[in-house]
Amino acid sequence: MSITYLEAIREAQAKLLRDDERVFIYGQDVGGAFGGAFKATKGLAKEFPGRVLNAPISEDAIVGTAIGAAVQGMRPIVEMQFADFSSIALNQILNQAGTHYWRTGVSVPITVRLPSGGTKGSGPFHS
């Protein structure tokens, strides 16, 4: 069997959603028909209603929401539209999620997907 890297990502996310009701995907346009900027969630919102969620255009809020959900027992997968946008949420990723366990003893099990390299010449702001 041969699949693309993108199809492997989509299938892995679908398996996680099937296997664990605590898993959800959160990001810009991930719940739409296109499936995010790179189609990594295409079809998943239909298969898993209420668990593949579109987020507002605020990377800091997206990661902050995921951290809060993870601390409460959920298993969020966050998708940034482009890796370059992650710098906006860097404080949340490094100083909140990354150090929370050492400050409180409570883990923050989140996955932050940072897609890049979609097209040539996209410039410094779209990977």
Image (cartoon, rainbow, N blue to C red):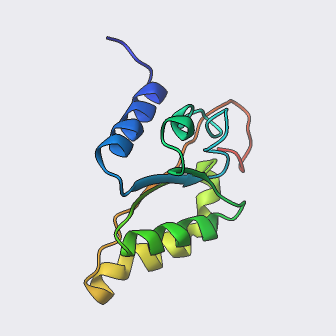
Residue 35 lies, with reference to residue 66, above or below; the image says: above
Residue 66 lies, with reference to residue 23, above or below; the image says: below
Residue at point 42%, 34% (across, down): 9
Please state which of residues 94 and 20 is positioned toward the viewer in this rendering: 20
- How many marks the image carries: the answer is 0
Q: Is residue 30 left or right of residue 23?
A: right
Q: Quadrant of the C terminus?
A: top right
Toward the front, the furthest residue is: 49
Q: Position of residue 88 (x, y in %)?
A: 64, 67
Res 79 seen here: no
Toward the bottom, the furthest residue is: 103
Please state which of residues 25 and 117 is positioned toward the viewer in this rendering: 25
Residue at point 29%, 74% (across, down): 107
Residue 80 lies, with reference to residue 66, above or below; the image says: above
Task: Identify the image quadrant of residue 116.
Answer: top right
Task: Identify the image quadrant of residue 77.
Answer: bottom left
Q: Quadrant of the N terminus?
A: top left
Residue at point 51%, 37% (across, down): 44
Toward the left, the furthest residue is: 105
Q: Position of residue 109 (x, y in %)?
A: 34, 64
Residue at point 39%, 31% (across, down): 11
Res 106 seen here: yes
Q: Position of residue 26 (x, y in %)?
A: 55, 55
